[in-house]
């Protein structure tokens, strides 16, 4: 197959690491299976064509403020023009684009027989419900454009049953148009290791560690965890909380989320129990998973949600809210607890339940987490299922 992938962010030119790294690895896997892959992404200056391990990368558009609407429109237009030129020269069997912010919209309106598959890793309505970063009118417009692109797509790939249900019930897409393909976790990267986190952060051995790993944005739930901490400390005052993730300007009323949380914990009198590290290398994240007693992911809305799976690959106990993939894992393990999104009290009670267990019991309960990840969330499985969707769409 000749495959075109439209994704604005592609390494090394990326701000939001998660999906850009996913698309890079996916593109290289397609090439390794004998397919020709072109990626159209945002340039950082002049347009350029280059290769990335036999993946043909086309950088288009201007190096503008990546967060602005003008920059996204500029990229979308130039990406569409580049795709049209490539289609007229040699053609593609399939075009794959992001659902989020309607990256495949122009092709969906003018595809002329070349089928379009959209992958859903987020959606604008999620921003409407969980953040004030964009104005309401902008977000409503983005949502409408997403649905317009989806109506013209041949298939939609959802990363969880939760997302599939949302697409059918809220975006009103035909159920038969949506395929569920779970994302993957690399078990060679995320694995139990001997951690040095306690020593580096000066956390005593007798103190339990509760870990949060995600961007410091409202949707990921850092404020929910902050509100749960006083309830936990009243029963287990030696507990330490470690929050790892990129700071954002999404605090209530605007400004740094990290600063907002620091002010909150200081006002509540438990600043000594919380460490906010900011961004750290992946190896440090793996160490943190291996060192913590409980990992928490109190997200408000997720299409997939990889951090709970990363923690599971390190045999870590998990408390997560019922959104994205986590919504499907409540019966997988007694050391994987699923709670109602946005409920700080429920979060605190679930954490206390796990922390009340002796460490050796908790380790025994979570000892099978890695096997679940290896069996259900492998990279090879994801790639084969996506290629099967492509083949089915082309055949139809």
Image: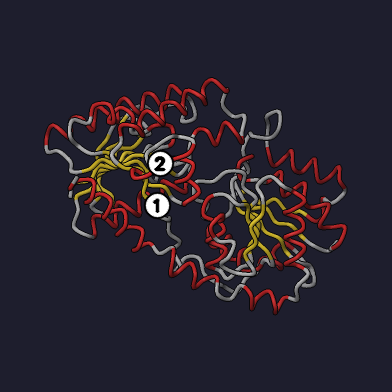
Point out the tag, 1 or 2, that comes first from the N-terminus. 2
Q: Does residue 218 sit above or below 368 in this rendering?
A: above
Q: How far from the left and from the top, in percent, is residue 342? A: 68, 45
Q: Residue 110, position in %: x, y?
A: 23, 27
Q: Residue at x 60, y 52 (%)?
A: 322
Residue at position x 24%, y 31% in the image: 82
Q: For the view shown, which residue lies furthest in the left direction?
A: 89
- Residue 288 location in percent, x, y? 62, 63
Left or right of 154? Residue 129 is right
The one nearer the camera, 242 or 108, is: 108
For disc 1, the marked residue is: 180
Residue 143 higher or lower than 284, as above or below: above
Secondary element under disc 1, as helix, strand or loop, is: strand
Residue annotated with mark 2 = 13
240, above or below 391, in the image: below
Query: Does residue 330 appear left or right of residue 384 in this picture?
Result: right
Measure the alpha-carbon separation of dots 1 and 2. Answer: 29 Å
């Amino acid at each position: 197959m000749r495959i075109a992938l439209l994704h604005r962010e592609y390494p090394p030119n990326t701000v939001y690491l998660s999906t850009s790294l996913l698309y890079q690895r996916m593109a290289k896997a397609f090439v390794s299976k004998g397919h020709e892959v072109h990626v159209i992404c945002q340039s950082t200056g002049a347009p350029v064509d280059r290769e990335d391990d036999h993946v043909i990368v086309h950088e288009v558009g201007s190096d503008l403020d990546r967060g602005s609407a003008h920059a996204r429109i500029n990229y979308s237009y130039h990406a569409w023009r580049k795709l049209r030129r490539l289609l007229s020269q040699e053609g593609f069997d399939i075009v794959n684009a992001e659902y989020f912010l309607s990256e495949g919209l122009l092709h969906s309106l003018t595809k002329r027989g070349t089928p379009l598959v959209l992958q859903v890793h987020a959606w604008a309505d999620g921003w409407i419900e969980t953040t004030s970063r964009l104005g309401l009118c902008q977000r409503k417009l983005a949502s409408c454009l997403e649905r317009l692109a989806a109506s013209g797509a041949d298939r939609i790939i959802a990363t969880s049953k939760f997302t599939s249900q949302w697409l059918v019930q809220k975006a009103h897409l035909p159920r038969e148009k949506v395929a569920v393909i779970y994302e993957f976790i690399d078990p060679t990267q995320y694995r139990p290791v001997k951690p040095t986190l306690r020593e580096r952060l000066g956390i005593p051995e007798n103190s339990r560690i509760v870990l949060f790993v995600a961007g410091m944005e409202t949707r990921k739930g850092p404020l929910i965890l902050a509100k749960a901490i006083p309830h936990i400390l009243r029963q287990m005052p030696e507990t330490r909380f470690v929050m790892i993730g990129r700071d954002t300007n999404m605090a209530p009323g605007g400004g740094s989320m990290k600063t907002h949380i620091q002010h909150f914990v200081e006002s509540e009198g438990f600043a000594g129990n919380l460490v906010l590290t900011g961004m750290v290398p992946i190896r440090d994240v793996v160490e943190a998973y291996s060192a913590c007693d409980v990992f928490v992911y109190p997200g408000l809305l997720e299409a997939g949600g990889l951090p709970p799976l990363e923690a599971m690959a390190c045999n870590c106990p998990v408390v997560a809210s019922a959104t994205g993939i986590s919504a499907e894992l409540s019966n997988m393990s007694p050391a994987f607890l699923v709670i109602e999104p946005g409920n700080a009290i429920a979060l605190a009670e679930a954490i206390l339940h796990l922390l009340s267990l002796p460490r050796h019991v908790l380790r025994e309960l979570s000892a099978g987490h890695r096997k679940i990840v290896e069996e259900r969330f492998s990279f090879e499985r994801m790639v084969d299922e996506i290629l099967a969707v492509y083949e089915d769409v082309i055949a139809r």
